[in-house]
Image (tube, rainbow, N blue to C red):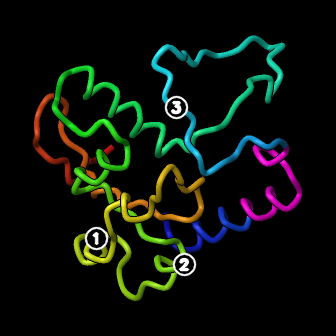
Amino acid sequence: MSKPEIQAVLADHRAAKQDKRGLFSQNIVTTKLAPFDDQRRERKGPISFKPFSDKGRVNFPKFFRRQAELHVRIANGDGIPADLRAFIKTKKDDLALGTTDFLNLKGPTTGTKAKAKFENVAAFLGGNKYPTGPELVFFENDSRLVKAGTTTSINSWSP
């Protein structure tokens, strides 16, 4: 995301929190992660589905995905730390930067030059306290489009 896009999301987040809308309409957003439940299945609900009919805490998706990966890798016997924070610490490309620090960056905010300014996500975690969203900007490795079934990059195309 660009800086203006992040600023717009932050403004929406602040307004929702202040007005107690959406996830903030109930006391379900917390910095304490809910335990990962490998039996939980997400299915499209019926038309009669009522928002917030589920009970319990909400895990920020960035950490839910890491919980899911940890669960699968432990089940596969990968010999990795069982603690989520310790597991994240082993992932060298799992990087983030505080939002304020990101918005104050000079120069490019993508690519290897910017990547050097980001830290391992574990540096932002304490005990069982996990950010709920806007506190961090996560670094995603650059992606590239490749020809199906190959590693050949697609650099241009014509209609």
The answer to which of marks 2 and 3 sits earlier in the sequence is 3
Question: Which amino acid type corresponds to the residue marked 3 in the rendered image?
Answer: Pro
Q: Which residue is mark 3?
A: 35
Q: Which mark is residue 115?
A: 1
Location of residue 63 with respect to 139 vertically, above or below:
above
Mark 3 Cα shell of 10 Å, populated few (<14), some (14-19), many (≥20): few
Residue at x 27% of width, y 69% of height: 111
- Which residue does the image show at 83% across and 41% down from the upper left? 26
| Label annotation for residue 100 | 2
The amino acid type, in three-letter code, at marker 1 is Lys
Q: Main secondary structure of the magenta part?
A: helix
Depth-wise, is mark 2 or mark 3 nearer the camera?
3
Q: Amino acid at mark 2?
A: Thr
The percent coordinates of residue 68 (x first, y second) are: 40, 30
Q: Is residue 14 above or below residue 151?
A: below
Q: Which is nearer the eye, 151 or 85?
A: 85
Tell me the magenta residue range: 12-25
Tell me: residue 32, above or below residue 136. above
Front residue of this view, candidates 106 and 52: 52
Instruction: Give the residue drawn at x 15%, y 48%.
Output: 153
Q: In front: 13, or 77?
A: 77
Element at label 1: helix
Q: Residues within 10 Å of mark 2 (few under 14, many from 20)?
A: few
